[in-house]
Image: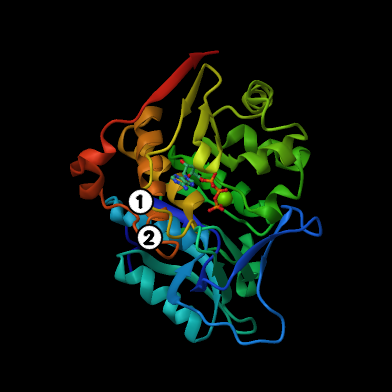
Amino acid sequence: METMAYDVITIGSATRDTLLKSAAFKVMKSQSFATGKALAVELGSKIGVDEVFYGTGGAATNTAVTFARQGFRTALVARVGDDVLGRAVADEVEKEGVGVEWLLRDAGTPTGYSVILEHESGERTILAYRGANEKLRHEDIPWDDIPCAWMYLSSLSGDLGIAKAALESAGRCGTRVVWNPGGRDLALGFEALSPFLKKVNVFIVNQEEAAKLLGISYDDVNAVFKKFDEAIDGIAVMTQGPGGVYASDGKTLWKAGIFPEQAVRDRTGAGDAFGSGFTAGLMRANGDVALALRLGSANATSKVEHMGAKGGLLTRQEFDDDPRWRDFSIETIAL
Ligand SMILES: Nc1ncnc2c1ncn2[C@@H]1O[C@H](COP(=O)(O)OP(=O)(O)OP(=O)(O)O)[C@@H](O)[C@H]1O
Ligand SMILES: [Mg+2]
């Protein structure tokens, strides 16, 4: 069989998600937790749930759905178990037109599964069983079969061999690599990531991840981008949740806020919506960071207004035709 041509391949995690929303979930201040806050329910009772939503998650599937809706030929690389949940993941992305020929099965480990406890405010706590995602290894990925395409890397479960192979593969055909690393990857530390940071075309982290990786406060934006610009030849992006986003290519620093949301229903997947929308913008017009910021931000705002990690992800037509997404104020600073 001849392999399909693809515009973009996403590599990372795939999960089955269940979202539970309840007015009984309380936010309590507590210094026992890193964020200073806990999501709490009464111990020893039965708690009513007001809303349930079954979907799929994991950055490889979330970002693949953005790309497919934006009109790009898309396939994903991820690992699920050989079980009902794994088939549900495959079904959901296939319905969106995403190629699943490199969705690997693991006979011995269940599909990753997340339960998302949703507070009325739209904030949430995720209980994540990583399952088969832990077993995504570069040596199991048939690199020679994967066609020339953009690569969107997310959590690599700490296997930098995947980043290396993706960069080599893209290098052979002159395409681009975007990386929005996961916790396991970031935990390897700045030194270990450096050789890859140098070569990726786009590197995306949120502000907490940037601060931890660089060992400095994210409030000092100039210092953050001084370090990123030294380490990264491509574009560095730091997202700040509802605070918006910064991007830099070492010559220009872009600063944008957000498209105001009508109501935050669920912020799960906002990071993936932004990163994939940003990348789709660059795929449409290479080097057009302003379009990338506008598409990433529109996709994230539309996402937080809907339930589930893929809810609200914009089609190309929705983005192009809705006047809501047309005007987006971006500040540029020459470096
Ligand atoms: N409540 C919100 N309303 C509108 N836009 C938002 C909101 N939250 C996030 N965004 C947009 O999404 C982008 C990414 O969000 P954020 O910085 O929270 O990513 P993240 O921490 O990686 O998210 P995730 O937890 O999904 O990985 C922001 O830069 C912003 O453009
Ligand atoms: Mg993130």
Q: Can residue 138 be seen in the rendering of this structure? A: yes
Q: How far from the left and from the top, in percent, is residue 113? A: 57, 75
Identity of the residue drawn at 22% across and 41% down: 320
Indicate the quadrant where residue 218 lies: top right
Amino acid carrying label 2: it is His
Identity of the residue drawn at 18% across and 43% down: 321
144 and 49: which is toward the camera = 49
Q: How far from the left and from the top, in percent, is residue 57? A: 49, 66
Give the residue at mark 2: 306
Residue 70 horizontal side relative to residue 317, left or right: right
Residue 202 horizontal side relative to residue 75, left or right: right
Quadrant assignment for the C terminus: top right
Residue extending farthest top:
334
134 and 269: which is toward the camera = 269
Quadrant assignment for the N terminus: bottom left
The numbered mark at residue 169 is none
Pointer 2: residues within 10 angstroms few (<14), some, or many (20+)?
Answer: some
Gap between marks 1 and 2, in whole Å?
Answer: 7 Å
SS label for mark 2 = loop
Disc 1 and disc 2 in contact, CB within 8 angstroms: yes
Give the residue at mark 1: 302
Identity of the residue drawn at 37% across and 61% down: 311
Q: How far from the left and from the top, in percent, is residue 310? A: 40, 61
